[in-house]
Amino acid sequence: MTLGIIAIGAAIAALCGAGAALGMGNATGKAVEAIARQPEAAGKINSSLMFGLIMMETCAVYALLVGILIVFILGGKAA
Amino acid sequence: MLEVSLTPTPCYVFGVNVGLSVVTAWCILALLLITLVVINIFVVRRMKPIPTGAQNVVELMVDGVHRWAEGKIGHAADFVAPVVMTLMAYVFCNTVIELFGLPPSTDDINCTFAMGLCTFITVNVTGLKFRGGIRGRIQGLCTPSVIVMPIRILTDFIAPCSIAIRLFANVMVGGIIMQLIYMVVPIILPAAIASYFNILHVGIQTFVLGLLTLVYVSEAIE
């Protein structure tokens, strides 16, 4: 019972990946549009895009860390 | 069974528990130092106007990082680029040893938090240096208006934590996924996937650390 609830908690933490994926897709799509419109600004667009992607990736990594901590630390204690 | 722990693996040096990651980092530092001394003796002291062989590689790395930093932070690159290069070399060497079956020392949150602190100190020293002392730095912190100052100070303090947790989580998760793959398919497949997690992924994390340091510095000096 407790293990089941812990697993549900980890699954909810992993939902953060959906948000990060939406953000990444949106940002990359917009960057591609911008490069298509103005190919000479590709370098600047790319570096801004990279910074934004890193920030979104951080969000996803935090969720991953929380999920892993829930599964291994809490799950290890409950089992 | 899978083993995951947040506390560093204990390792005793002269009866003091310093943790395995610290001992690994010491060995890596010694190796890096020896490499640098060798490069200094055999390459840097025999610099030629037209580079050949190893001089090409050394110039490519140093000049590459310097030019990259210059594109982000302008004239402050002379001051920051060596620090960024050092941080990147340290993190890369400490993480890539996983390829040789050794425990990576960035798998320990103490190590990555030290990296975050280095970034924090670099950012603040550069900010103080290039904005003209404490007054300029505080002025820079409340640039649009005074209301945003607490938020900007908070951002400055969160930055090292963010760097530390990102690097730690990425390396740890890479290790966990590799362990899972070893449990499912013990032959052939791990070799292919290890080349991603232990080389490409390490390169990306190193690049991200350097990029974040440069971006925070550019925010501090503008």
Image (spheres, helix red, strand yellow):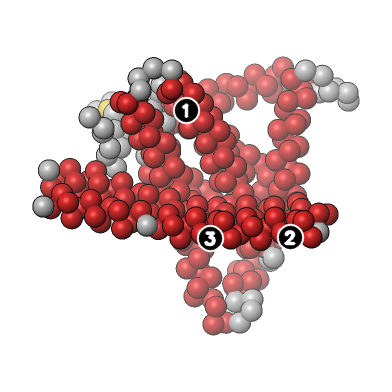
Quarter location, residue A29: bottom right
Label 3 Cα crowd, 10 Å radius (few <14 / some 14-19 / many 20+): some
Marks 1 and 3 close (CB-CB < 8 Å)? no
At numbered mark 1, what does the secondary structure look like: helix, strand or loop? helix
Q: Is residue A46 visible?
A: yes
- Distance of label 3 from label 2 (alpha carbons): 16 Å
- The three-letter amino acid code for the residue at tag 3 is Gly
Question: Which mark identifies residue A34?
Answer: 2
Label 2 Cα crowd, 10 Å radius (few <14 / some 14-19 / many 20+): some
- The three-letter amino acid code for the residue at tag 1 is Ile
Q: Quadrant of the N terminus of chain B?
A: top left
**Relative to A39, is A32 on the left or the right?**
left
What chain does badge 3 belong to?
A: A
Q: Which residue does the image show at 62% across and 69% down from the upper left? A: B137
Question: Which mark identifies residue A23?
Answer: 3
The residue carrying mark 1 is: B193
Question: Which mark identifies residue B143?
Answer: none
| Viewer-side residue, A14 vs B108 | A14
What is the x, y in percent for residue B221? 67, 63
What is the x, y in percent for residue B134? 60, 69
Does B210 appear above or below B162?
A: above
| Viewer-side residue, A19 vs B161 | A19
Q: Which residue does the image show at 36% across and 28% down from the upper left? A: B181
Q: Which residue does the image show at 57% across and 56% down from the upper left? A: A25
At numbered mark 2, what does the secondary structure look like: helix, strand or loop? helix
- The three-letter amino acid code for the residue at tag 2 is Ala
What is the x, y in percent for residue B152? 53, 70
